[in-house]
């Protein structure tokens, strides 16, 4: 099986299409000497292979072709489509070869932390930045739990919010495929998001920081 799992030190900004923007930028930060938690990444191609080999890509295409009419989609219809498509992905089995690659990297991460079943965050990483649209899972422990959460992140390409966004923009519903970042959890006193350009006005002379106590997922999703 081609290499589809990479340590943070093995990628950089040029690898946006390989592991997604978030993971590529973390790799670039590590190369610049900035402090980045120990982590490894699952490539976008791994997701494509999973979708292709399990047949779920064709199942999704058939479902969309036969049952989805974007012009007649309200909130309830979008939520139903989201639930159906995510279930299609999550019930499929990942290949043993990919499981072994992921498990090997996770065990090395555990050994380096001198901890059994080290807690990690399992994060989505698309080729374009879409904050809060896809899923992230915190404090995931153990290889079995990690594998399941990776599939849930892949399936989050079809959250109701993501589907609604694509319909609104005229983008094919099945157009997003995600990379995944596996990042060792840190004991965060506070966390958030920093924008080097004002996200609303586009003013390049302004830097905006939005943060909260503890983990920063509420900031990203707009719930805090």
Image (tube, rainbow, N blue to C red):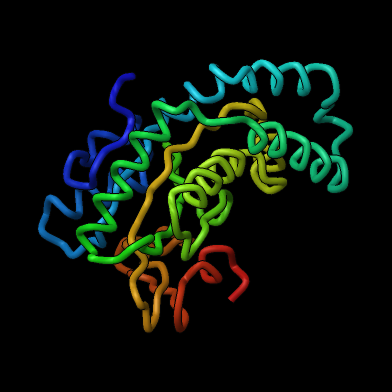
Seen in the picture, residue 170 relative to 27 is either above or below; the reply is above
Instruction: Decide which of 197, 77 is in the foreground and name it.
Output: 77
Q: Residue at x 28, y 58 (%)?
A: 110
Which quadrant: the C terminus? bottom right
Which quadrant: the N terminus? top left
Q: Quadrant of residue 64?
A: top right
- Counting from the top left corner in percent of width and height, residue 216 is at 46, 71
Instruction: Decide which of 150, 57 is in the foreground and name it.
Output: 150
- Horizontal side of 30 relative to 167 (left or right) equals left
Q: Residue at x 45, y 80 (%)?
A: 214
Q: Quadrant of residue 158?
A: top right
- Horizontal side of 50 relative to 97 (left or right) equals right
Report the label total: 0
- Horizontal side of 109 relative to 103 (left or right) equals left
Q: Quadrant of residue 41?
A: top left
Instruction: Decide which of 186, 15 is in the foreground and name it.
Output: 186
Q: Residue at x 80, y 30 (%)?
A: 70
Seen in the picture, residue 87 relative to 172 is either above or below; the reply is below
- Counting from the top left corner in percent of width and height, residue 58 is at 66, 16
Q: Residue at x 17, y 45 (%)?
A: 9
- Counting from the top left corner in percent of width and height, residue 148 is at 55, 45
């Amino acid at each position: 099986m081609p290499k589809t799992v990479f340590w943070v030190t093995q990628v950089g900004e040029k690898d946006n299409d390989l592991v997604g923007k978030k993971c590529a930028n973390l790799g670039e930060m590590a190369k610049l000497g900035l402090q980045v938690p120990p982590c490894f990444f699952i490539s976008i191609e791994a997701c494509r292979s999973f979708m292709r080999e399990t047949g779920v890509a064709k199942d999704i295409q058939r479902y969309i072709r036969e049952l989805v009419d974007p012009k007649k989609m309200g909130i309830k219809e979008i939520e139903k489509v989201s639930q159906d498509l995510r279930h299609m992905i999550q019930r499929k089995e990942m290949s043993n070869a990919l499981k072994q690659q992921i498990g090997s990297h996770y065990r090395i991460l555990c050994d380096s932390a001198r901890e059994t079943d080290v807690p990690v965050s399992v994060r989505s990483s698309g080729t374009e930045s879409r904050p809060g649209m896809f899923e992230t899972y915190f404090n995931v422990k153990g290889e079995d739990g990690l594998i399941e959460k990776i599939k849930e992140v892949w399936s989050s390409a079809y959250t109701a919010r993501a589907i609604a966004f694509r319909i609104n923009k005229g983008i094919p519903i099945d157009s997003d495929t995600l990379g995944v970042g596996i990042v060792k959890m840190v004991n965060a006193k506070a966390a958030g998001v920093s924008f080097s350009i004002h996200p609303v006005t586009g003013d390049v002379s302004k830097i905006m920081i939005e943060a909260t106590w503890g983990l920063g997922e509420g900031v990203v999703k707009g719930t805090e």
